[in-house]
Image: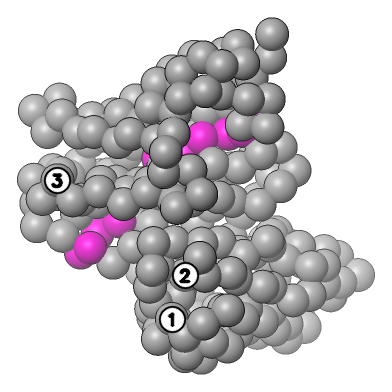
Amino acid sequence: QITLKESGPTLVKPTQTLTLTCTFSGFSLSSSGVGVGWIRQPPGKALEWLALMYWNDDKRYSPSLKSRLTITKDTSKNQVVLTMTNMDPVDTATYYCAQTPYGSGSYSYWGQGTLVTVSS
Amino acid sequence: DIQMTQSPSTLSASVGDRVTITCRASQSISSWLAWYQQKPGKAPKLLIYKASSLESGVPPRFSGSGSGTEFTLTISNLQPDDFATYYCQQYNSYSTFGQGTKVEIK
């Protein structure tokens, strides 16, 4: 059974750096083709793709947010970490991590999401 | 960046109806398109990948078609559980989601 779960702060101040951890089970990020991505959704708005980490350490970032994002993995801990710098109130959203099998880019398994509020 | 435009934004339908949602890409994405269903407070659920492949466990009343820049999601015989918001996602170049289509009860 594949599961993913996001963890991190629920409240961050403007200009701070957000660090979110995705802890997963039921698959290995060392298996060929597998990837773990991050997607966010502001309250009442659409989904926005952020970043993707592949099994081979290849990384992809949203062009509009690339300068603020870093994605890393710890295969031994079954974790993928996303950091986003210079947080702003417009970054308030539910952040999801999700798994894409076979390098496809469509996400078959999702975490429950974690709401991050940016406010002073 | 590839932009994804869904239409309509809202769709009113009745149980048993056949509904169609359209997604247009700003440039060709071949068949690298997925469709998701999302209910309030829940994570999205993958329905269709590679434009027309049905994800395991998804009822066959859901179908997808298209290639290049124009795609459709069709729900035949709409069921009460299908009232939700639907998103398309391209993954040809990085990834982009559409703005969503809410299917509501007529």
Label 3 neighbour load within 10 Å: few <14, some 14-19, many 20+: some
Tell me where residue B4 appears, x and y as whole percent. Answer: 60, 71
Label 2 marks a residue whose chain is B
Is residue B96 among the parts visible in the rendering? Answer: yes
Q: Secondary structure at mark 3?
A: loop
Is residue B91 on the magenta stretch? Answer: no
Residue A26 occupies quadrant:
top left
Give the distance between the C-alpha atoms of the residues marked 1 and 2, in whole angstroms. 7 Å
User: Which of the labelled discs sits on residue A57, or is there none?
Assistant: 3
Q: In this view of the protein, which residue sits in the foreground, B5 or B103?
A: B5
In the image, what residue type sits under mark 1?
Answer: Ile
Label 1 marks a residue whose chain is B
Mark 1 lies on residue = B29
Q: Pick out the residue farthest to the front.
A: A67
- Are the residues tagged 1 and 2 within 8 Å (C-beta)? yes
Residue A19 occupies quadrant:
top left
Q: In this view of the protein, which residue sits in the foreground, B53 or B33?
A: B33
Say which residue appears at 8% left-offset and 45% top-offset.
A30
Give the distance between the C-alpha atoms of the residues marked 1 and 3, in whole angstroms. 24 Å
Residue range of the region highlighted in magenta in the rendering: A92-103
Q: Is residue B38 left or right of residue B48?
A: right
**Up-down relation of residue A19 to residue B24 (above or below):** above
Q: In this view of the protein, which residue sits in the foreground, B53 or A106?
A: A106
Mark 2 lies on residue = B90
Tell me where residue A31 appears, x and y as whole percent. Answer: 9, 51
**Up-down relation of residue A19 to residue A26 (above or below):** above
Label 2 neighbour load within 10 Å: few <14, some 14-19, many 20+: many
